[in-house]
């Protein structure tokens, strides 16, 4: 969405040595479309972005099952939740 696109751009700029995982309903194509609509696509280093398709409405961050949730939980250092 609107806020997430700008948040991704800013996190990548502020944390130049980090990877950013984005939970996106609709997956990578939706994220790329959102960034393009806001003219931000060229400001994103896609090599540092992991897109995880999910829907917060489904529980476990929308990841579908507890095993996948635990795998992601072990790999992530911090969560920024802009959907609230």
Image: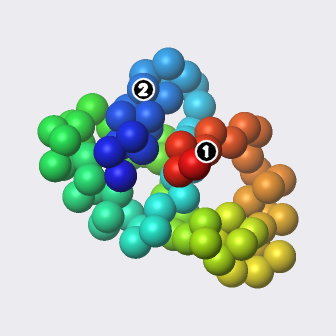
The structure residue drawn at horizontal position 61% and vertical position 72%, both measured from the top left corner, is 57
**x and y percentages locating residue 21 in the rendered image:** 57, 49
**x and y percentages locating residue 53 in the rendered image:** 51, 69
Q: Is residue 20 left or right of residue 76?
A: left
Q: Quadrant of residue 43?
A: top left
Between marks 1 and 2 in the image, the one whose residue lies nearer the viewer: 1
The structure residue drawn at horizontal position 83% and vertical position 76%, both measured from the top left corner, is 66
Please report contact status of discs 1 and 2: CB closer than 8 Å, yes or no.
no
**Which secondary structure, mark 2?**
helix
Total count of labels: 2
How busy is the neighbourhood of tag 1: few (under 14 within 10 Å), some, or many (20 plus)?
few
Q: Compared to 5, does 58 lie above or below?
A: below
For residue 40, say whether it is visible.
Answer: yes
Q: Which mark is residue 59?
A: none
Give the labeled residue for mark 1.
Answer: 81
The structure residue drawn at horizontal position 34% and vertical position 57%, both measured from the top left corner, is 31
- Given the current orientation, which residue lies at the most extreme bottom position? 65
- Given the current orientation, which residue lies at the most extreme top position? 14
**Foreground pick, 65 / 15:** 65
**x and y percentages locating residue 18 in the rendered image:** 59, 31
Give the labeled residue for mark 2.
Answer: 10
Q: Is residue 5 left or right of residue 42?
A: right
Q: Is residue 29 left or right of residue 10?
A: left
**Foreground pick, 82 / 31:** 82
Measured Cα–Cα span from mark 1 to mark 2:
14 Å
Q: Is residue 80 left or right of residue 4?
A: right
């Amino acid at each position: 969405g609107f806020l997430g696109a700008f948040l991704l751009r800013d996190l990548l700029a502020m944390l130049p040595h980090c990877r950013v995982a984005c939970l996106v309903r609709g997956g990578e194509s939706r994220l790329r479309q959102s960034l393009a609509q806001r003219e931000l696509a060229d400001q994103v280093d896609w090599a540092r972005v992991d897109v995880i398709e999910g829907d917060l409405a489904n529980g476990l961050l929308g990841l579908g099952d507890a095993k996948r949730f635990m795998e992601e939980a072990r790999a992530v250092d911090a969560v920024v939740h802009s959907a609230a």
